[in-house]
Image (tube, rainbow, N blue to C red):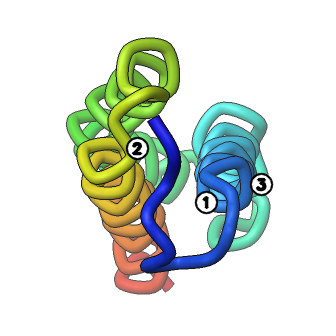
Amino acid sequence: MRRPPRWGISPVLPASANLLLAVLWIFSAAGGWGGDAFCTADRACLDDYRRAVELSVALAVPAGIFGVLGWLLLRDHPQELDTLLLLTAALWIAAGAILFIGGYLLT
């Protein structure tokens, strides 16, 4: 099915943006970027930051699932894919915001 001329861009662009948001979240949550940014070798702070990571996982996991399933199952349905990619981006942004706000409140 051809994409309606509503956006004029390929769905690869928002899908790539979602992938970049996912990579940023992974590095911030699991890669240690967030802990290094907000906690300077303070063990109690790192433990508290892990709580923020645990909260953000509740949004990151559905975002990852929606992104992958949307791309695999909805490529031929542009309206639904657009909606799902937008929802996925919102979830990644919210997950990152939880990390940032949680880390900021620790400082």
> Is 28 or 82 nearer to us in this picture?
82
Looking at the picture, which amino acid does disc 3 mark?
Trp
Looking at the picture, which amino acid does disc 1 mark?
Pro
Q: Horizontal and vertical percent for residue 106?
A: 42, 76
Mark in front: 2 vs 1: 1
Please give the residue where the numbered disc 3 appears in the rendered image.
33
Which mark is on residue 53?
Answer: 2
Q: Is residue 33 left or right of residue 17?
A: right
Q: Horizontal and vertical percent for residue 34?
A: 66, 59
Please give the residue where the numbered disc 1 appears in the rendered image.
14
Q: Is residue 57 left or right of residue 33?
A: left
Q: Horizontal and vertical percent for residue 95?
A: 37, 56
Residue 32 in which image quadrant: top right
> Is 56 or 61 nearer to us in this picture?
61
Quadrant holding the N terminus: top left
Instruction: Name the secondary structure under disc 2.
Output: helix
Instruction: Name the secondary structure under disc 3.
Output: helix
User: Crowding at label 3, few (<14), some or many (≥20) Cα neighbours within 10 Å?
Assistant: some
Q: CA distance from mark 3 to mark 2?
A: 12 Å
The residue depicted at 40 percent of the width and 44 percent of the height is 53
In the rendered image of this protein, does residue 73 appear above or below residue 88?
A: above
Q: Is residue 76 left or right of residue 41?
A: left
User: Crowding at label 1, few (<14), some or many (≥20) Cα neighbours within 10 Å?
Assistant: some
The residue depicted at 39 percent of the width and 46 percent of the height is 78
